Amino acid sequence: MATSYVGAIDQGTTGTRFMVFDHSGQVITNAYKKHEQIYPEPGWVEHDPTEIWENTKHVIQEGLESADLDPTQLEALGITNQRETTIIWDRDTGKPVFNALVWQDRRTTDRVEELQEAGKVEEIREKTGLECDAYFSATKTEWILDNAEPLKLESVRPGELRDRARAGELMMGTPDSWIIYKLTGNHITDVSNASRTMLFNINDMEWDDELLDEFDVPREMLPEVRPSSDENLYGHTDADGFLGAEVPVAGALGDQQAALFGQTCFDAGDAKNTYGTGAFYLMNTGNEAVTSDHGLLTTVGFQLSGEPVQYALEGSIFIAGAAIEWLEDVDLIYNAAQTAQLASSVDSTDGVYMVPAFTGLGAPHWDGRARGTIVGMTRGTRKEHIVRATLESIAYQTRDLAEAMEADSGVETTSLRVDGGAVKNDFLCQLQSDIIQTEIARPEVDETTALGSAYAAGLAVGYWESMEELRSNWQVDEEFDPEMDDSQADKMYDRWDDAVERSLDWAQEE
C-alpha cells in the first residue's frame, strides 16, 4: 500500500509554494514559483489572480512529479495565504474583474482618513479587533466596486459592479477563497482570514451588517465562513480536473495564523514571529479576545471543528524581508545571503538607522504616510553600515511588538519561536535575541506556514489524531541567547525611536 501524505498550498505575497509533509511533519517535496508584482502608481500594489491560479496548478504538478507522488497519495490539501489581499471575480465565468489589491496597497489611505475624521475608528476596532487602516480588505473591496469598471472591462459593464454584486453575480474573497473556489467550486473562507477583512465581527463570529453598510459591500458576494480545520470539508478537487483525483480540501489559515499553528503555539501565552516580506508577531490568548491598548491587533488565531475559537494578539510589520530585497534592488547586495557577511564585517552601524517604512508603518505606530528613511549617515558611511542598519531595523521593529505584547497581555516573553526565510540568517537571529534580550528558538522545519495549513487539513481528515501528536513533531534546530549587555541593547533601541519619529507623516498630498 502506498504511503499517504498531506499537501499544503502556500499562496504568498511574492510567489506560490506547494509542499507535501509526512506524518512526522517532514518535507517530502517543495516547489515554488514567483508571480509578477504590479505597481501602477506609487503606493499601489497589485497581483494578477489568474497568474496566481496558473502558478498554483504548476507548483502542485511540479512538486508531485519531482517526488514521484501520485495525487491519490494525498489524504488532504490545506491552504495558507497572504491575508487581506482582495480579489473579486465573476461567479459564472470564474474570471477576476480586476487585479488583486495586495495587503501592502495604500490607495485607500484617504478613505481611511475619512473614517478616522468621522470618529468611527473605535467602533471598527471593537467589532473587528483591527486598526482602521488601508491594510485590510474592506476599503480595498469598496475601491474595486467603485473604480474597476473604467479600468478593466473584461467582464463588467460600466456602473454595474455593485448591482451585479447584490444580484450574487460577483464573489469576493482573499486568496484562500480564490484557491478554494478554483479547486472545489465552493465559495468558502476560514475564520482566521475572515477576521482580517475589517468586515467580520470577531465577537459574534459573523459578517457585520453595519460594516457591510459602511463600505457598501453586498453580503451576497461574501464567502461562507468555516473552521480553519473542518471535518465537514470545504470540498474536493475535481477528478476530471488538472490534478486527476478527488482530494479533500479540509483546512485553511491566513499565513500568520498558519505559522502560529505550525509552530504548535496551541496554548495561551505561546508566541511566534514570522519573518517574510513583512514580519508578524502573534501570541495565542486562548478563548479570550484581548483588547490592545498599545497598537496591536486582536485577531482570530484558529478554530478546530466543534471547538471554540482561539484568539491571538498580533503585531504587523509591513516591511522586513522586503527591506533586504530593496538592498538588492539598489545594488547594495547581490543576494540575501550576503547580508550576514557584510553586516558582521563592521562592529556597528556607526550611528546609522534605517526605517523601512516603504508602505507606511504598521504596529504599534499605524502611520500610512510614514516613508522609508535613513538617518545618521556621514561621509564615512559605507554599504556595510547600511546593510547592518537594515538587519537591525527588523530586530528593532520586532522589539516594538514584543514590548507592546507584554504590556497588553501581562505575559513576559521568555522564548520566541521564529520562522520564515530570514531566520536562516544566524546573524539576524543572534541580533534579534540581543535586541529583545530573550531566547530565540528556530525549529528544524522552518516552513511553518505551509506546515500549519497541512496540520489543519490533516487533523480534519484524521491523518493526525490530536494536537499532542503535532506537538511531538516540533523540534528545535538552534537556540540563540542574548550576548549583548542589556544596557547596550536599551541604548541602541532608544535611538531607534528617534529615527522612527523622522519617518512619520512624510507622504503628503501634492
Image (cartoon, rainbow, N blue to C red):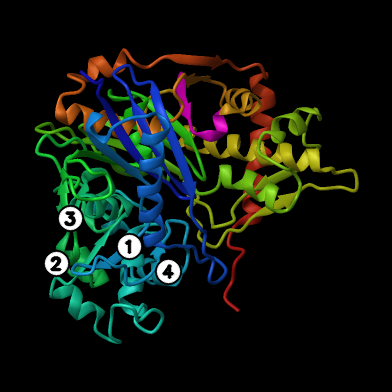
Q: Quadrant of residue 25?
A: top left
Q: Position of residue 339 (x, y in %)?
A: 70, 35
Residue 87: assigned label: 1
Q: Are marks 2 and 4 in contact (CB under 8 Å)?
A: no
Front position in the image: 174 or 507: 174
Q: Residues within 10 Å of mark 4 (few under 14, many from 20)?
A: many
Q: Circle 2 sits on which residue?
A: 220
Q: Earlier in the sequence, mark 1 or mark 3?
A: 1
Left or right of 195, for residue 255: right
Quadrant of image for the C terminus: bottom right
For the residues labelled 4 and 1, the Cα–Cα distance comes to 15 Å
| Local SS, label 2 | helix
> Does residue 291 appear anywhere in the picture?
no
For the residues labelled 3 and 2, the Cα–Cα distance comes to 16 Å
Q: Circle 3 sits on which residue?
A: 185
- Magenta residues span 413-423
Q: Position of residue 260 (x, y in %)?
A: 35, 31
Residue type at tag 1: Ile
Q: Quadrant of residue 109?
A: bottom left
For the residues labelled 2 and 4, the Cα–Cα distance comes to 23 Å
